[in-house]
Amino acid sequence: MSRAPLWRAVAALAVIATSLLLALTMAPRLGLDLRGGTQLVFETKDSPTVRADADATDRALDVLRRRADALGVVDPTLVRSGEKRIIVELPGVLDPREAAEVIGKTAQLNFHPVLGPAGDGDKDAIADESGQKLKLGPVALSGAGVTDAAAGTDPQLGPGWFVTIDFREAGPWRELTGKAACEPIGDPRRRVAIVLDDEIISSPQVNETVTCGAGIPGGTTQITGSFSAEEAQNLAVLVKGGSLPVPLELVEQRTVGPTLGADAIAASAKAGVAGVILTAVFIGLVYRLVGLLAAVALACYGLISYAGLVAMGATLTLPGLAGFVLAIGMAVDANVLVFERAREEYGAAPRRGLKAALDRGFKKAWSAVADSNITTLLAAGLLFWLASGPVKGFGVTLAIGVLASLISAMLITRVLAAALIGRFGPGVSGLGSIGRVRTWLTRRNPDLMRAGRHWLAVAAGLLVLVGAGLVTRGLNYGVEFTGGRIVEFGTSRPVDVAAARQAVSDAGFPTAVVQRSDDAISVRTGQITADDVVRVEEALDRRVGEVTKQRDELVGPSLGAELRRNALIALGVALAAQLAYLAFRFRWTFGAAAVAALFVDAAVVLGAFAWLGKPIDGVFLAAMLTIIGYSVNDKVVLFDRVRELWPVSRGTPFGRVVNTAILQTVPRTVNTGLGALFILAALAVFGGDSLRDFAIALLIGIVAGTLSSSFVAGPAAIELERRAGQPPPAPAAPRRRPVARDGSGAVV
């Protein structure tokens, strides 16, 4: 007796127990779009003396980390991305002005002697605090000589704030102040200019008690001026953190309020629960007992996916939550493939019993399951490597979900079904018949491929319609691909969009795009500053009532062009990777036909978004790559069946073989599509504005992908095979069974 079922049961129990332990003992790491905060992306630039390479970026990263710590941010995250970019995540920091101005400031701090008032034509003169132009001597002491800085106040000295600076060595400061003390009291040359980023922040006069040549001893001084508490604190942070080795440019900024993040988590949870319930009810009605067991395995899938996320330390983002929910539909796909195959096996040999049919169903479905999941993993990998921001999280969760779906379907479902399938009759098991749809198709046997060229003509007409939409309507690129700023404000009551648009125009931005959705107003503009955002918020407050900033995203023009280029590369590489994989696993004609159908699917979604005016952004890119990975599953299943039928039907025309394969795989295609549609409908209803467009793109893509498998990929393969001139594959050689021996086989 084989011990494989026992080992499978032990492995399933170990996976579930480990996942449960991880889920109970580890907390997920939420992205800023879920817990609130600010993400800044800086890009290092060459300075006159230092080249912005990986080493300089690492040194700048150390300086930024010290500044973030000095600001008191809880659990900041700072990482280098590529050679020249630094990603800074500041949970709880909702004012991007403070974060960007303090953390990203170059902070070149220098101490200069004052040579006197500047002449009219002196281009190197710098104005002091009062506006008087001063001529400065060479740098006597740099910020590198500072060991500590702190903001403070002393009521005995007055109400103002000051900054205390401690120097590494007392000598240079004593020498600088000693020379200044030799000048008469009131003379500008008795002052010391403290310059931060080519701006005099303080130019105090050396106290009259300091004697000429002696200077200020002790290596400590105080910078006084008209500082507020915040200004003094920020200056202390900059001085203490040190100077950046190279200048930084802010290329991207995202700010999300904690309320929006909490709402997104709640909405995604509702979508996940609703999707799981609907899918479980559907699969239970269609497949009865084994369907209910698959629903239990789906619950285990959710546990395994969650445990995988927390174990990897992956950051869970809003698109990542969508990927987590969407992978439920992919987990259904593997179960449907197995059950449909098991139904066929039982119908072909009912005397062998349900258990044997189920085992053969798992074995024969494995090829299609593996191929379809590998193609989805290719799409997830491209998302991770070529996408940016929260969309990367979607790629991670999608990949984890695919792997978890394999475990839930091919291991847990198999263990549960093997334990219970023999205790019930064929009708209750759900495997006793091939189903009403398949029975009806078998009886009618429609020849869909007779009109194959007509179906291809319809697909060509859709492409023409897509082209018309792209030419006449164009694509509504989001800020992520064009550069600019988009700010979303929550409102306490319904607001007239015309009044909001007028308020934004009065604030100085008449060309801004103002839109309303539910209880929020979004304002999309070009490259405006954080101060400009405050002006817009104040104008909306005055005109439409109290508003609260929920989301603020800034993307620089160079980064937008780069993201747009990466999106095109990702889509091109996705199609090429699918073609290469399908050509390797099947015939090149099958791979080319599948990619042609995928191109139609992607074009239909793109055209629909052009006609509807929906935004094309990073979340749309995630949807497109998911559609490519999801849609290719249908093509893999179809051509896997063609590859199985063709060698044993060598006298049958190839078009008839394809038609038979389509009819045999229709139940799987329809049931898998419906399972995914339940999930996406739940996301569209409960997922909120941020996920609604994502769900709409996937709904269109899955419907198009389901139809294109039969009416584009099938006819295209027939046309390509007519021109290829290759013979059909030879049938596989039957396996020779070992001959049973009489006796033990021993020789004396």
Image (spheres, rainbow, N blue to C red):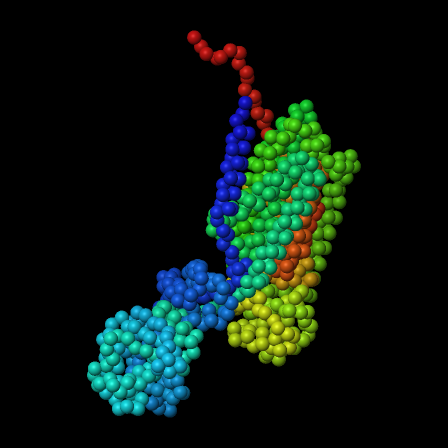
The residue under the point 52% across, 51% down is 396
* Occupied quadrant, residue 541: bottom right
Q: Is residue 589 visible?
A: no
The residue under the point 56% across, 21% down is 737
Count of labels shown? 0
Measured as percent of width and height from the top left, residue 236 is found at 37, 72
Measured as percent of width and height from the top left, residue 60 is found at 38, 65
The residue under the point 40% across, 73% down is 233
Q: In which quarter of the image is the N terminus?
A: top right
* Occupied quadrant, residue 691: bottom right
**Residue 120 sits above or below residue 413 on the image:** below
Measured as percent of width and height from the top left, residue 741 is found at 53, 14
- Left or right: residue 287 compared with residue 205: right
Q: Find the residue positioned furthest to the left.
A: 213
- Nearest the eye: 675 or 152: 152
Q: In which quarter of the image is the C terminus?
A: top left
The residue under the point 21% across, 83% down is 213
Q: Find the residue positioned furthest to the top.
A: 748
Q: Find the residue positioned furthest to the right.
A: 444
- Nearest the eye: 694 or 44: 694
* Occupied quadrant, residue 291: top right
Measured as percent of width and height from the top left, residue 163 is found at 35, 76
Q: Can residue 690 be seen in this view?
A: yes
